[in-house]
Amino acid sequence: MARCDIVIACLFSTVFLLVDITSGGQSNELTVEEDGMKASLKFIINHPLNKNRPASFLLGSPLTYEEAFFTLQPALDKIDRLHVEQIIQLYEYTDGINSSLAGDFPPNDLWLIPGYYLMSLKEAVDTALTMRRVSAVWNSSWLPVFSSGAGDFIVFDLNNGRIFEIVAKESLVWEVAANIEEFVRQSAHNLQSGMIFIGEDGLMDETIADDRVLNKEDPIVQKTGERFSLQIGHIFHRIYIARSVETRPVSETNIDKDVAQPRLVFNCGNMPNVCANIRNAINNNRKTRNLQRITSRSQIRRNRRASCGRLRCPRGQSCDEYPFASTSQGGRGATIRCVPAAENNSQGGQLNGFYRRYRLGNNSWFRQTYP
């Protein structure tokens, strides 16, 4: 079905409003017979980037249909069970990774896809029940399937079967696939095409749509009204340049100091460990309090991977980082600490509320008050 996505790209000091007017395509190499969910999972697990890594050999044994259905029961209260068969099919291939049994391996060693490991079904259900209580953005029909280990999830909607990426700390939600099979197949094709790779920092990384549009080497037509084609994985997009506007880069050095920036004030009574991490970042690591929000899904994911990908947190805790992954100052070098997951979720609600209250969009500046 046709889809329309709007992407804003900064290229050669010009902002282009790009409209993806169609999407479609098919596998280049996997045959129809091999293109099902279980075959795609097998391909992902046995791919050279995963084979002989903890991401592969820590996976649990397959569950029977009865075992999977029984494990799901606590998450199925008042849920339409029409789509439950899809998630059971996934766990009939492997029960994922029980992170509490993963020893001292950092999260990045567990990833099957960039930024995420496949959760065991029991851990997925327990996490869903916890997030229903502590997260302001969590939908009661969501079942997390993949976890970053830092509070982000790929979730399966038990009511409609759709797949969403949840950045809980920033209260961000993106729909990423129509169903779990499409998501797994897309990940397999991205591995096969080289769009998933090991980055310069040694972490698994991925090229997704807004990366390709932003890439200066892509043959992007720079005139309003023209079109060009773009292949994202195995899907072909036709991009229409709806409008181009001249702009100039903004940096912390040319912020107008006479203009009052919105001030972010946290309620530290709800999250003492998070606030302690911010104080440590500012006092001891000299991290800036002037922050610039970003909204690029790929850059936020990359920042989170770079900052938290190697920090192993005990169960019930998640990685907190300052500067935030949703700012251009976040990423590699951020000050990190394991904090109770409930505190990270509280911070996410406060941070998202702040962004909304002051209508802070991409590249908007604000100032973190000393907590």
Image (cartoon, helix red, strand yellow):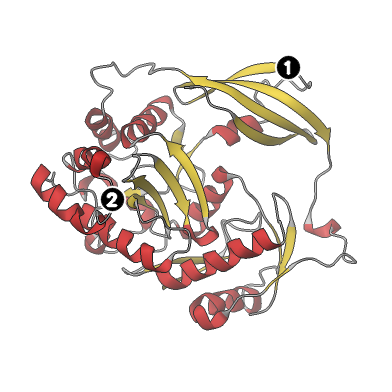
The structure residue drawn at horizontal position 88% and vertical position 61%, both measured from the top left corner, is 256
Residue, x 63% and y 80% (percent of image)?
371
Residue carrying label 2: 79
Residue 172 placement (x, y as % from top left): 53, 53
Q: Is residue 335 visible?
A: no
Q: Secondary structure at mark 2?
A: loop
Residue 317 can be seen, yes or no: yes
Report the side of 152 relative to 334 (left or right).
left
Q: Is residue 23 above or below residue 262?
A: above
Establish if 258 lies above or below 188: below
Cα distance, mark 2 to mark 1?
A: 46 Å
Question: Which is more toward the observer, 32 or 216?
Answer: 32
Query: Does residue 259 lie above or below 221 as drawn?
Result: below
Q: Residues within 10 Å of mark 1 (few under 14, many from 20)?
A: few
| Amino acid type of the residue tagged 2 in the rendering | Ile
Secondary structure, mark 1, is loop
Upstream in sequence: badge 2 or badge 1: 2
**Image quadrant in which you'd find residue 209:** top right
Residue beneath the point at 56% across and 80% down: 268
**Outermost residue, bottom side:** 269
Left or right placement of residue 236 versus residue 255 in this view = left
Dot 2 crowding, Cα within 10 Å, few <14, some 14–19, many 20+:
some
Q: Position of residue 117 (x, y in %)?
A: 33, 49
**Disc ID at residue 226:** 1
